[in-house]
């Protein structure tokens, strides 16, 4: 690594040392200005910013050992293969999973599609229920719908209560039918922040039917909460590097290896085969069977560096930092007349993706004025239309926080809301 | 630059909408347009009268839910097209569309307050918002000309 040491490298026993002000210095984008004002980045639930160690790791691949993996016998190819597999191992350790069950994909969405096409399409049939929830991101709804017709199963949804929690009575009623063979649920809502009791839900699904599988959307939870795949008792976990300080272009499917062994390939091509003849092919061992073609090598190396960065901060410390921000942000927002915060208000029950509405103002107008104030928030339906509709609206404004956010930015957010309200004449 | 987007005239139409109504007596045509990607909803109702051989817009009202740009643009549109022949109103809609794509327009004066939306062209993600009312108008005219009384359209392009 060149230049100054990063904050995450400074100390491995950091829970008492967690200092977002120091951490910020590792993130070059946070130094820039937007419309003449210092950037206040409150959209990490969409994409997190990238720290120097991640950029340097990817740069290292392209400047020192750029080569394809699992093929060549030369030094660069061996180094590239080692770095790629090392990243897989570090991510597996980070989420408490068997390295043979970690498949690199294009994004979390592709990970869901892999499970949909390779497991749901070939395993579910008429009479089976695929249960998901009204809280899900479209990535955890649409892939199931795409394979529903050929496979002939039913899709049901667990409703969401007014306070943004899953309706567990409805969940139990549906699971008790014994028809639920796949349950797909987010560990943390990208809209209202709700943290779902995934391990408990998974146990109930498995108790009702021992051939059922549980698929968890970890796109929001893996970057923000300590994760242990083994103790969650689930079968699949989908996640995304760019929401956890890594690069775009790489997602991760974590699976129980014995399930992957039995599943047919999703995409075909080079890398994923054992042998190819003109009449057919045999397939490589897992996880390579699911990584057709040249994989995302530089991105995997970047992910490995992001995992190191977060592991050095300590995920318990990351979570504690975010609870602190949530504890300050929600009351601050609610103190503004006309502002409604959606989802659970107890910081222990939620992550730092905080959606709110301002009475009489459309989120796109709010987002535009905030942008002019240098504040990046998300406005819209957050790719979770069924959930946003259940909030009684078509769109919300979302501020989301991460390791580099500081309490002063909450003050600026509140100030910008006041500016927006004044601009539109307190409508 | 925010002032280019949120021109005073636009904010005035947003705060004090013109011809905004949930219904129109003896309406000849009603169209409903929505953009599911941003959630904007717009209802437009026209009453058409004969003026010699031509059909003119006797009355036009809108109602809906959406951002300030989409609602204010619909409001300004109703003032600009009321009393015009259907053909003339379509031509004006084409003028507005050209303006939103940054092209010069030859009927600036006829757009009335619609000209205040010229600056929206600098905000590509908001152009669709400004066009929503005018697209609904064109659809209402063509629906009427086809002898129909109502039409629903879903726009699949994002306004943000």
Image: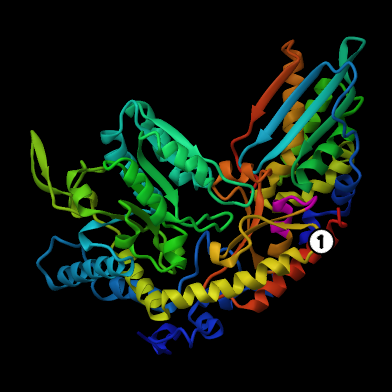
Give coordinates of residue A375: x percent, y percent. 66, 67
- Does residue A161 lie above or below A322 as drawn? above
Residue shown at 35% from the left, 84% from the top: A1
Which contiguous range is marked in magenta? A359-368
Mark 1, Cα crowd under 10 Å, few <14 / some 14-19 / many 20+, is few
Residue at 36 percent across and 72 percent down: it is: A307
Rendering coords of residue A206 (x, y %):
32, 46
Total number of numbered labels?
1
Q: Residue A76: image x %, image y %?
A: 18, 71
- In this rendering, the answer to whether B89 lies above or below B150 is below
Name the residue carrying label 1: A337
> Is residue A367 a member of the stretch shown in magenta?
yes
A56 with respect to B46 (left or right): left
Tell whether A19 sits left or right of B50.
left
Foreground of the two, A169 or A349: A169
Q: Main secondary structure of the magenta part?
A: helix
Q: Name the image quarter holding residue A374.
A: bottom right
- Residue A198 position within the rendered picture, expressed as x and y whole percent measured from the top left: 42, 55
The residue sitting at 35% across, 69% down in the picture is A302
> Is residue A272 shown left or right of residue A377?
left
Of residue B86 and residue A10, the one placed in the foreground of this image is A10
Is B122 rendered above or below residue A122? Answer: below
Give the chain of mark 1. Answer: A
């Amino acid at each position: 690594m060149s230049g100054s040491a990063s904050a995450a490298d400074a100390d491995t026993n950091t829970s008492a040392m967690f200092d977002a002000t120091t951490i910020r210095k590792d993130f070059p984008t946070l130094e820039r200005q937007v419309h003449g004002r210092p950037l206040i980045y409150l959209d990490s639930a969409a994409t997190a910013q990238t720290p120097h160690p991640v950029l340097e790791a990817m740069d290292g691949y392209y400047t020192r050992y750029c080569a394809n993996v699992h093929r060549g016998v030369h030094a660069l190819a061996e180094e590239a293969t080692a770095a790629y597999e090392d990243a897989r191992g570090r991510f597996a350790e980070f989420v408490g999973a068997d390295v043979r069950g970690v498949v690199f994909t294009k994004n979390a969405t592709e990970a869901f599609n892999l499970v949909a096409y390779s497991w749901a399409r070939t395993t579910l049939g008429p009479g089976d229920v695929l249960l998901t929830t009204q809280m899900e991101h479209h990535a955890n709804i649409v892939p199931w719908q795409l394979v529903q017709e050929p496979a002939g199963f039913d899709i049901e949804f667990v409703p969401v209560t007014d306070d943004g929690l899953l309706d567990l009575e409805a969940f139990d009623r549906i699971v008790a039918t014994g028809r639920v063979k796949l349950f797909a649920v987010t560990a943390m809502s990208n809209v209202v922040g709700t943290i779902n009791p995934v391990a408990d839900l998974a146990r109930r699904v498995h108790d009702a039917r021992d051939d059922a599988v549980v698929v968890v959307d970890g796109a929001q939870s893996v970057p923000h909460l300590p994760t242990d795949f083994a103790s969650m008792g689930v079968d699949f976990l989908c996640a995304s590097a760019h929401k956890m300080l890594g690069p775009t272009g790489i997602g991760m499917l974590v699976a129980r290896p014995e399930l992957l062994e039995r599943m047919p390939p999703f995409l075909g091509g080079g890398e994923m085969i054992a042998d190819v003849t003109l009449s057919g092919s045999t397939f490589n061992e897992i996880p390579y069977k699911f990584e057709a073609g040249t994989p995302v090598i530089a991105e995997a190396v970047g992910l490995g560096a992001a995992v190191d960065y977060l592991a050095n901060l300590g995920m318990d410390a990351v979570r504690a930092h975010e609870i602190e921000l949530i504890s300050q942000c929600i009351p601050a927002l609610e103190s503004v007349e006309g502002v409604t915060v959606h989802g659970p208000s107890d910081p222990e029950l939620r992550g730092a993706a905080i959606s709110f509405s301002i009475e009489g103002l459309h989120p796109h107008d709010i987002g535009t004025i905030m942008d002019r104030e240098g504040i990046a928030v998300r406005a819209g339906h957050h790719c979770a239309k069924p959930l946003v509709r259940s909030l009684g609206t078509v769109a919300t404004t979302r501020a989301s926080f991460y390791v580099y956010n500081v309490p002063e930015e909450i003050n600026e957010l509140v100030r910008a809301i006041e500016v927006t309200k004044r601009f539109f004449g307190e409508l | 630059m925010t002032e280019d987007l949120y021109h005073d005239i636009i904010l005035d139409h947003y705060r004090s909408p013109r011809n905004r109504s949930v219904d129109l007596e003896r309406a000849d045509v009603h169209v409903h347009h929505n953009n599911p990607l941003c959630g904007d909803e717009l209802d437009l109702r026209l009453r058409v009268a004969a003026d010699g051989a031509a059909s003119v817009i006797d009355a036009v009202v809108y109602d809906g839910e959406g951002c300030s740009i989409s609602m204010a643009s619909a409001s300004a549109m109703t003032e600009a097209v009321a009393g015009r022949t259907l053909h003339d109103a379509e031509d004006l809609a084409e003028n507005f569309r050209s303006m939103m794509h940054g092209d010069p327009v030859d009927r600036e004066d006829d757009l009335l307050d619609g000209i205040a939306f010229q600056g929206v062209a600098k905000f590509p993600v908001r152009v669709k918002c400004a066009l929503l009312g005018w697209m609904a108008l064109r659809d209402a005219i063509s629906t009427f000309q086809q002898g129909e009384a109502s039409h629903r359209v879903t726009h699949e392009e994002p306004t943000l």
